[in-house]
Image (cartoon, helix red, strand yellow):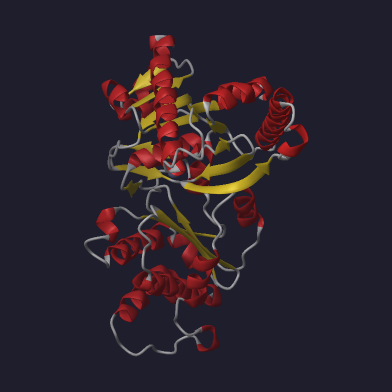
Amino acid sequence: MQENNSAEQIQQTEQQSATPQPQRKKHGKKWRELHPRSLLRAMGSQDGVSEDKLRALVETEYTDPVISLYLGLGPEKVAPEPKGLLRSFHSMKTHALDEHKDFVDSLSKSQRATLEHDIQEIDAFLADYFVPQHLRSLVIFRSGERLNEVIGLLVPVNDGMKIDPDPYITPLEAVLEDDEKVLFVECAKQDTKFLLYQLGSCQQIDRSKAFVPTDTVDKSIPHHAQQHRLEHLRGHLRQVAGEVYQLYDQGTCDLLVLMAENRVAALLDEYLHESLKPKIIARVLDSPDADMRNRKELIENALREHRAEKETKAIEALQNHKPEELVTSLRNVINILNLFLIRKLLVSENLHQKGFACKEHHYLSLEAGNCPFDNSKLLAAENVVDEVVEVARLHGVEVLIIKQRQDLLAEYGGIAGVHYAVPPQTVAATG
Ligand SMILES: [Zn+2]
């Protein structure tokens, strides 16, 4: 009897412990002191997110269940109501325990105790946590003593919580995939700084200084001195160009922004590898010493323009496809996606609609009902558009989230896809 109700039990235990009663010692030694110390420590030591880190996360084996929590830090959750974060965690937790009921019910007594403790610790952490203003989202992975990660992101993610044998990393993968790393090259005559912009943060990663010739040697012959300095400038720029190429080649960056005064910029161009030229998204033709503007803002402006251009091109390119290959509006996209026939998808960032899903068979619907594959009841999804994107990514569909030019996608109902040819009777049957 008890075994069947463990998911509810955890919820009840949770509700009891939320009231300020003295903590009952239910699980003997397993019950550690309830203090979010290890999560706070993880927060302090977090060093961002990378593909290597994600790989390490999924390659590790976990004996206890893994909690994966994604919390968007919109102003509505953080600013006016300090407990907003905790409230959304509570509703996500209820939803997650329900969604993963079968898995939770299959856990051993000790695994379940760990899960309960992990949930309580996250709860205590979020109650105490002071959200830094610049953070847009928070990601927590937790599995007993084995896994303890808190990742603060400067980019938004959608809310979600999973309880699984492994960490759920799809949203983080999407964040990384979507993120373009920009190398900002601040090039002066004798000193060049390399800044890397990634996931909303900007850091200097390298600096290259030219060997400065002493003027004394050539002082007597002014023309010679000038010649000499030009050679040194060329030498410095050749070195800078080499370093930019290397950083790009190693995958450190995807795009470039160059800052240099006109003459230096023109010389640098002579040395830059041809393959890098299309990667330059902006040029700031100013001497780095004279231009005090915030570098991060310069990069973000350049990225926004670059992004808007990329989105415009992608939306306009929809017209190049035959009308029968084009699918628009959420309902039609879902129908074709359920047939696994979409190959390219453009989605407005703000498109939002409730819907239903079978997670196991990746079957989606705007209406309640049963999954046609196993006849199980479809689960409600707060935003079925998130499910659409997730399923599309799982199937290797090329997905572009439209952020800057949502206006252009409006005529398609905020979502459009390109699909493989499909016999019309099949569409009719599922629509
Ligand atoms: Zn199903």
The front one of 59 and 191 is: 191
In which quadrant of the rendered view does residue 212 lie? top right
The front one of 199 and 409 is: 199
**Residue 287 visible, this orientation:** yes
The percent position of residue 3, horizontal first and vertical second, equals 46, 73
Q: What residue is shown at x 36% (from left), y 78% (from top)?
A: 13
In which quadrant of the rendered view does residue 325 lie? top left
**Residue 106 visible, this orientation:** no
Q: What residue is shown at x 38% (from left), y 69% (from top)?
A: 129
Q: Is residue 57 left or right of residue 346?
A: right
Q: Is residue 347 above or below residue 79?
A: above
Q: Is residue 11 above or below residue 187?
A: below
The percent position of residue 95, horizontal first and vertical second, equals 35, 59
The percent position of residue 267, horizontal first and vertical second, equals 63, 23
The front one of 8 and 147 is: 147
Quadrant containing ligand 1: top left
Q: What residue is shown at x 21% (from left), y 61% (from top)?
A: 80
**Split into 4 quadrants, where in the image is the C terminus?**
top left
In which quadrant of the rendered view does residue 78 lie? bottom left
